[in-house]
Image: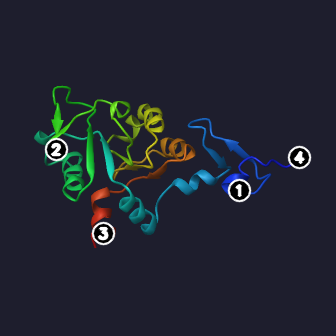
Amino acid sequence: MASTLGTGMGLKPGVGLYIAALGGVMTEDGEWRDNLVVADGELGALLRRARRIAVLGIKPESKSMQPAYFVPEYLQDVGYDVIPVPVYYPKVEEILGRRVYRSLGSVPGEVDLVNVFRRPGDIPPHVDEIIAKRPGAVWFQLGIRNDEAAERLARAGIQVVQDRCIMIDHRRLVRA
């Protein structure tokens, strides 16, 4: 018997739909790969859509020469609402003039994008929290790639960018 599950989403009946275990997002087998963002047009659209960016792994002003500080500073300077979520620095209460949150779950309201400054092996413990926050996208900074985490996020319906600098892409695709 052909399944009609998902036909209201514009999907054809009987194409092997399933409910993803995380987030309860309905996907077609393989459709999750559509959430892996690599094309310039999609990157630019994602950056134009986002307004509120939580930065997981942001560094404080004392580390201003490191990308985990100056990239979020750039994002704030060009008009994004940057929410600092440092992983270390327990005594720091403000970064970029904004209150610090110790977890994504403690950030009030919605987040459009989570910008990640964490080593690839340190990302998995954050995946459930990211999925629970339900951002539209997650951006792993240049040099950061974790295919397993990216697949889990993409299967949950979250767009994922890996191994790209959000500042460079913003300058190239949005400010150009």
Q: Position of residue 128 (x, y in %)?
A: 47, 33
Instruction: Give the residue at mark 3.
Output: 172
The color scheme shown is rainbow
- Taking the view exactly as shown, the residue that stands out farthest to the bottom is 176
Q: Nearer the viewer, mark 4 or mark 3?
A: 4
- Taking the view exactly as shown, the residue that stands out farthest to the right is 1
Q: Position of residue 7 (x, y in %)?
A: 73, 53
Residue 85, by quadrant, is top left
Dots 2, 1 in contact, CB < 8 A = no
From what the image shows, is residue 144 above or below residue 172?
above
Q: Earlier in the sequence, mark 2 or mark 1?
A: 1
Q: Which mark is residue 1?
A: 4
Instruction: Give the residue at mark 2.
Output: 96
Q: Earlier in the sequence, mark 4 or mark 3?
A: 4
Q: Residue at x 78, y 53 (%)?
A: 13
Q: CA distance from mark 4 to mark 3?
A: 50 Å
Q: Residue at x 33, y 40 (%)?
A: 118
Q: Earlier in the sequence, mark 2 or mark 4?
A: 4
Q: Position of residue 29 (x, y in %)?
A: 68, 50
Q: Position of residue 32 (x, y in %)?
A: 59, 51
Q: Residues within 10 Å of mark 2 (few under 14, many from 20)?
A: some
Viewer-side residue, 51 vs 131: 51
Q: For the residue marked with disc 1, what is the amino acid? A: Leu
Viewer-side residue, 98 vs 150: 98
Q: Residue at x 42, y 52 (%)?
A: 162
| SS at mark 3 in the image | helix
Instruction: Give the residue at mark 1.
Output: 11
- Taking the view exactly as shown, the residue that stands out farthest to the left is 62
Residue 114, by quadrant, is top left
Q: CA distance from mark 2 to mark 4?
A: 57 Å
Q: Earlier in the sequence, mark 1 or mark 4?
A: 4
Q: Earlier in the sequence, mark 3 or mark 2?
A: 2
